[in-house]
């Protein structure tokens, strides 16, 4: 059963929502109008400069005939992830929110990964590659309306994450995201029932989660939105 219900029918009570996450190498852009997904795009963030995102957003809005003034909410993935991608994504969202006077929804990228698995019964372990043998990670309870972070955020090697997971109660876990061979080997040594799902969130997942957070009044003042940067252990 899907963790988030998403109607294909337009709903006049649901706002026009522009959302993106540029924290990973597979960035997501989504636009929802009346609760209906009208744009879903995957792209690779451009490294080396910071002015590339806004032209892309403008182009997609023009293609579907939506003016910036028609937007009612902006949502952004706040990391953890690549430093430049997180910085560009968050700073652009804050600028749009302030310029248009609309709410901003800050979405932790690991929460989005957990939500995309649509798993309610087991603890969900969200994983993203932090490079150099390290991984960003968070343990999520997805039994409620929104995935709940049941651990702190981690940037660790697979064996260190496995030691944390070994202390967790429960018969089985779902591991979702950047499921590398290193992750599989380290986690399988736990001798627990573990399912691995290597996937990246879709635009639909980001839109669903953003809409659910908006309906739960989780919008923020743009100046209060802080990116999640995790440093590798020294």
Image (tube, helix red, strand yellow):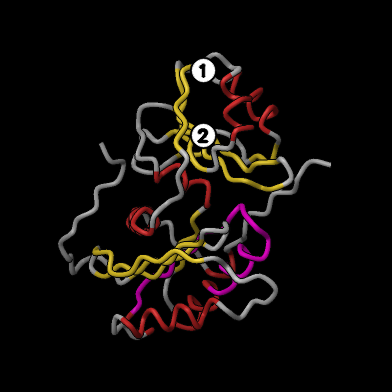
- The residue at which mark 1 appears reads as 169
Question: How far apart, in angstroms, are the residues tagged by discs 1 and 2?
Answer: 13 Å
Is residue 98 highlighted in magenta?
Answer: no
In the image, the segment drawn in magenta is 71-92
Q: Secondary structure at mark 1?
A: loop
Quadrant containing the C terminus is top right
Q: Residues within 10 Å of mark 1 (few under 14, many from 20)?
A: few
The foreground one among 122 and 127 is: 127
Q: Residue furthest left?
A: 9
In terms of sequence position, does the residue under pointer 1 or pointer 2 come before the other? 2
The foreground one among 64 and 46 is: 46
Q: Residue furthest right?
A: 234
From the top left corner, tell me how far across and down residue 226 is, in percent: 62, 60
**Residue at figure coordinates x 66%, y 22% from the top left:** 163
**Residue at figure coordinates x 61%, y 52% from the top left:** 80
Q: Is residue 153 left or right of residue 123?
A: right
From the top left corner, tell me how far across and down residue 228 is, in percent: 63, 54
**Residue at figure coordinates x 23%, y 68% from the top left:** 34
């Amino acid at each position: 059963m899907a963790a988030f219900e998403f109607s294909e029918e337009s709903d006049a009570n649901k706002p026009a929502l522009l959302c993106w996450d540029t924290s990973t190498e597979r960035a997501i852009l989504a636009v929802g109008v009346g609760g209906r997904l009208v744009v879903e795009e995957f792209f690779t963030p451009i490294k080396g400069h910071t002015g590339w995102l806004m032209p892309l957003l403008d182009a997609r809005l023009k293609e579907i005939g939506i003016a910036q003034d028609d937007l009612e909410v902006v949502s952004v993935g706040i990391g953890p992830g690549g430093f430049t991608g997180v910085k560009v994504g968050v700073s652009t969202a804050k600028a749009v929110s302030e310029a248009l006077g609309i709410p901003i929804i800050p979405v932790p990228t690991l929460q989005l990964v957990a939500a995309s698995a649509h798993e309610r019964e087991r603890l969900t372990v969200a994983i993203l590659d932090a490079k150099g043998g390290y991984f960003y990670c968070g343990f999520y309870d997805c039994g409620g309306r929104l995935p709940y972070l049941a651990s702190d955020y981690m940037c660790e090697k697979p064996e260190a994450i496995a030691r944390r997971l070994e202390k967790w109660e429960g018969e089985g876990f779902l591991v979702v995201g950047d499921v590398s061979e290193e992750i599989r080997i380290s986690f399988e040594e736990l001798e627990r029932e573990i399912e691995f799902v290597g996937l990246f969130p879709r635009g639909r997942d980001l839109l669903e989660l953003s809409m659910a957070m908006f309906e739960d009044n989780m919008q923020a003042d743009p100046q209060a939105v802080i990116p999640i940067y995790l440093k590798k252990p020294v």
